[in-house]
């Protein structure tokens, strides 16, 4: 269970997401002058990723039913767009104190809106996740128990044991997951993002370790979606 209340978990998730945004993404949102040269087409991507991060921390309910990420993202996107242009411009300021104050103000607005719009409920995590920080992922980024792969996964080699798979988006290979014998991490699954053709403009690694096959496949799919969504937004 969480060691902090759901309201604080939301605030932390929002704040962390802002801190992890690249400098260029912040500049695209802030503009190069107050209200000028802003690239707001990236907002759906930023809002969607923030919503997913929040829902990894808490369940948001409306009339007793869990709210989907798309619904949360719409509210977040509206708040990002409604944030005063002068305040938005400060988010990418070279003055650290000024930038942090603006991000804090926006974080508070988003947190308060979500708490007023929905009911935040604590969720439980897989016991193994509390010890999986050595994988390089913080607690808010772990793959939750209910998440399942949504793309096709097939054995890499015909006839080989079930320890090596490739994932596909239709016919496009998106990544590979496998276990490696005779190394310290042989009880974990190694994953590789295999999405080709576009620049990897994303704060997301291209490889890493996960505790289970399911988590490794989900990690590949998350990173694949993050890369394709951001490249799509950048090219729009």
Image (cartoon, grey):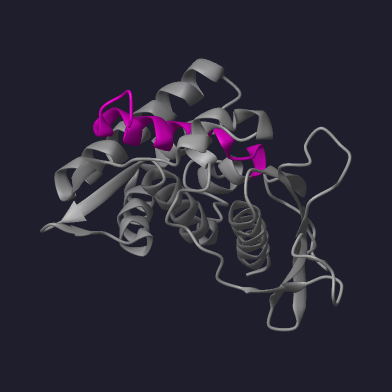
Q: Nearer the viewer, residue 79 or 138?
A: 138
Magenta residue check for 22? yes
Magenta residue check for 2? yes
Residue at 37% in and 48% down: 55
Residue at 56% in and 19% down: 95
Residue projecting furthest to the left: 63
Name the dominant secondary structure of the magenta segment: helix
* Coordinates of residue 96 in the picture (x, y in percent): 55, 18
- Decide if residue 40 is on the left or right side of residue 62: right
Q: Nearer the viewer, residue 101 or 10?
A: 10
Q: Is residue 17 visible?
A: no
- Decide if residue 223 is on the left or right side of residue 197: left
* Coordinates of residue 53 in the picture (x, y in percent): 45, 45
Q: Is residue 179 visible?
A: yes
Question: Considering only vertical position in the picture, is 122 above or below 202?
Answer: above
Q: Quadrant of the C terminus?
A: bottom right
- Decide if residue 35 is on the left or right side of residue 121: right
* Coordinates of residue 177 in the picture (x, y in percent): 75, 58
Q: Quadrant of residue 115?
A: top left
Q: Quadrant of residue 217?
A: bottom right
Residue at 85% in and 77% down: 158
Question: Considering only vertical position in the picture, is 189 above or below 139?
Answer: below
* Coordinates of residue 143 in the picture (x, y in percent): 52, 48
Q: Which residues are magenta?
A: 1-24
């Amino acid at each position: 269970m969480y060691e902090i209340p759901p309201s604080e978990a939301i605030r932390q998730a929002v704040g962390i997401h802002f801190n992890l945004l690249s400098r260029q993404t912040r500049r695209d949102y802030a503009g190069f002058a107050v209200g000028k040269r802003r690239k707001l087409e990236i907002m759906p991507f930023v809002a969607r990723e923030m919503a997913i991060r929040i829902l990894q921390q808490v369940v948001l309910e409306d009339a007793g039913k869990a709210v989907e990420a798309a619904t949360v993202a719409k509210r977040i996107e509206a708040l990002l767009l409604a944030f005063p242009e002068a305040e938005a411009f400060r988010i990418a300021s070279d003055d650290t104190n000024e930038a942090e104050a603006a991000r804090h103000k926006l974080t508070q607005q988003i947190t308060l809106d979500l708490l007023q719009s929905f009911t935040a409920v604590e969720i439980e995590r897989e016991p193994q996740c509390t010890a999986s920080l050595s994988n390089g992922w913080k607690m808010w980024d772990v793959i939750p128990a209910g998440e399942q792969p949504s793309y096709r996964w097939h054995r890499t080699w015909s006839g080989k044991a079930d320890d090596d798979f490739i994932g596909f988006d239709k016919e496009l290979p998106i990544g590979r997951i496998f276990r490696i014998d005779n190394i310290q991490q042989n009880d974990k699954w190694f994953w590789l993002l295999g999405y080709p053709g576009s620049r990897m403009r994303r704060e997301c690694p291209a490889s890493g370790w996960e505790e289970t096959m399911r988590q490794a496949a989900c990690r590949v799919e998350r990173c694949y979606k993050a890369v394709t969504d951001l490249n799509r937004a950048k090219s729009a």
